[in-house]
């Protein structure tokens, strides 16, 4: 299976099926600084698309490394509520969390898309759709500091993170789309939270994003297929 209609089906994902529980807000800019137009009535927090973009030319996908950024005040707020010095979050702890989440993002997206038959490449060029993902506003309820006596944390979720993704034309470098989708990590059920449960909750969100993308690529391709002659 190729993904000639990747960008078109990605639009279908954004506008029809990703269920984040929030639609495009009327307070969002209708046109961004780089000329993208707000897509109304989506289930994503915000979607902007380039008007008149030619989306049929893409047959390959280049998934760039995922950038990860914490909420600016997360470390400070977390440490202020932590009694034991050994349980405080260090800069090294934050770097490890960012690196691990970035690797997990690309691993899951690549795994899901490849398994579905979509061709993944590592460089841009003609026919290549570049996907530049980022996780921003990351907050973790119970990060693993490797402290031997880490106190148990009970919470309704593992934290939160926001998907910030941009699509680019692989030949010209022109931006095609931008999407923002915040997600809570977990099921709103109070339980012990630790690095293991945090990872599981994050993986579920990442796999949902990747699976929705992959499923809609397949759906769009099947819908656009030419029936075989009898």
Image (cartoon, grey):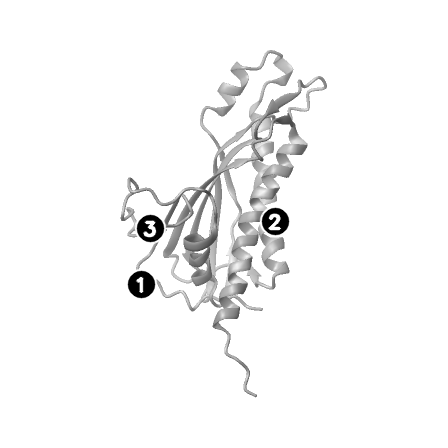
Rounded to the nearest whole Å, what is the CA distance between mark 1 and mark 3? 16 Å
Q: Residue furthest bottom?
A: 230
* Residue 225 sits above or below residue 20 on the image: below
* Residue 211 sits above or below residue 221 on the image: above
Rounded to the nearest whole Å, what is the CA distance between mark 2 and mark 3? 29 Å
Quadrant assignment for the C terminus: bottom right
Label placed on residue 108: 2
Which residue is at a point 28% across and 44% down the rendered structure image?
29
Q: Secondary structure at mark 2?
A: helix
User: Which circle's residue, 1 or 3, is located before the other in the chain?
Assistant: 3
Q: Can see residue 228?
A: yes
Where does label 1 land, which residue?
A: 52
Of residues 229 and 11, the one nearer the viewer is: 229
Q: How many marks?
A: 3
* Residue 53 sits above or below residue 20 on the image: below
Where does label 3 land, which residue?
A: 40
Residue 184: % across, % down:
51, 35
Of residues 133 and 206, the one nearer the viewer is: 206
């Amino acid at each position: 299976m190729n993904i000639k209609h990747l960008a078109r089906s990605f639009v279908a994902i954004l506008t029809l099926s990703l269920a984040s529980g929030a639609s495009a807000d009327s307070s969002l800019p209708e046109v961004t600084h780089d000329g993208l137009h707000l897509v109304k009535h989506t289930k994503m927090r915000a979607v902007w698309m380039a008007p008149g973009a030619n989306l049929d030319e893409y047959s390959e996908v280049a998934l760039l490394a995922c950038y990860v950024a914490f909420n600016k005040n997360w470390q400070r707020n977390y440490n202020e509520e932590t009694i034991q010095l050994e349980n405080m979050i260090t800069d090294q702890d934050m770097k490890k969390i960012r690196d691990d989440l970035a690797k997990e993002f690309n691993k899951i997206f690549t795994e899901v898309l490849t398994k579905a038959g979509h061709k993944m490449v590592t460089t841009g060029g003609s026919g290549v759709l570049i996907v530049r993902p980022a996780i921003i506003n990351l907050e973790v309820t119970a990060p693993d500091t490797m402290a031997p006596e880490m106190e148990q944390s009970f919470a309704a979720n593992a934290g939160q993170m926001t998907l910030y993704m941009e699509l680019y034309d692989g030949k010209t470098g022109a931006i095609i789309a931008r999407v923002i989708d915040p997600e809570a990590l977990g099921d709103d059920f109070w339980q012990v939270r630790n690095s293991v449960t945090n990872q599981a909750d994050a993986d579920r969100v990442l796999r949902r994003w990747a699976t929705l993308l992959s499923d809609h690529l397949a759906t769009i391709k099947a819908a656009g297929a030419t029936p075989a002659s009898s």
